[in-house]
Image: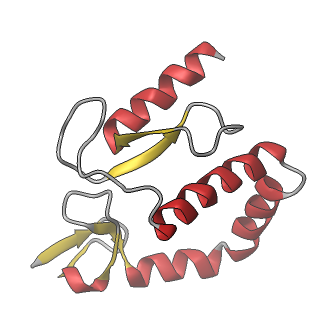
Amino acid sequence: MIKHCPVCKTDKNISLFGSDKRKRDKHDAICLECRRDYKKRNREKLLISQRARRKDNDDYRMKHSAHNAVLTEIRAGRMTKPDKCSQCGAKRTVEAHHHDYDKPIDIVWLCAQCHAKEHSKMEILQ
């Protein structure tokens, strides 16, 4: 299967693209070579922004802790990940949505589209 990379503007075999389960074809939009070049060119910028997000960021720590709590519950078998969205009922890959990060196990399973809508609603309310 052939896929077009918009950065280098060439058609390449799909095996030369990274995986991205959120995409329809399950592959990244940019080829691995272009992704690697971007990361090399912008290494310092990427590290600085990553550190800035994490350093002394209580919100980040709470989100990260809640995410890990869900993963731990799934791995231990105390929680199962359903195969359909609890909001629209579509059979898709679902993501855990936390209404309150202080309650890390109190989650709703949403598809990517419903999850994005839920977060946009939350941003409007804030």
Instruction: Say which residue appears at 49% left-offset and 20% top-offset.
Output: 121
Residue at the far right in the pictured view: 56
Q: How many labels does the image show?
A: 0
Closest to the observer, 121 or 25: 121
Q: Position of residue 15 (x, y in %)?
A: 23, 85
Instruction: Say which residue appears at 66% left-offset and 17% top-offset.
Output: 126
Closest to the observer, 91 or 22: 91
- Classify residue 112 by image quadrant: top left
Residue at the far front in the pictured view: 78
Vertical order, 115 against 120 (above or below): below
In the image, taking residue 78 as reference, residue 47 lies left or right, namely: right
Instruction: Say which residue appears at 40% left-offset and 28% top-offset.
Output: 117
Vertical order, 41 against 51 (above or below): below
Closest to the observer, 118 or 106: 106
Vertical order, 54 against 35 (above or below): above
Q: Position of residue 18 (x, y in %)?
A: 35, 77
Q: Where is residue 110 in the image (x, y as percent from the top left)?
A: 36, 40
Q: Where is residue 9 in the image (x, y as percent from the top left)?
A: 28, 71
In the image, taking residue 23 as reference, residue 40 lies left or right, namely: right
In the image, taking residue 81 as reference, residue 43 lies left or right, namely: right
Residue at the far left in the pictured view: 1
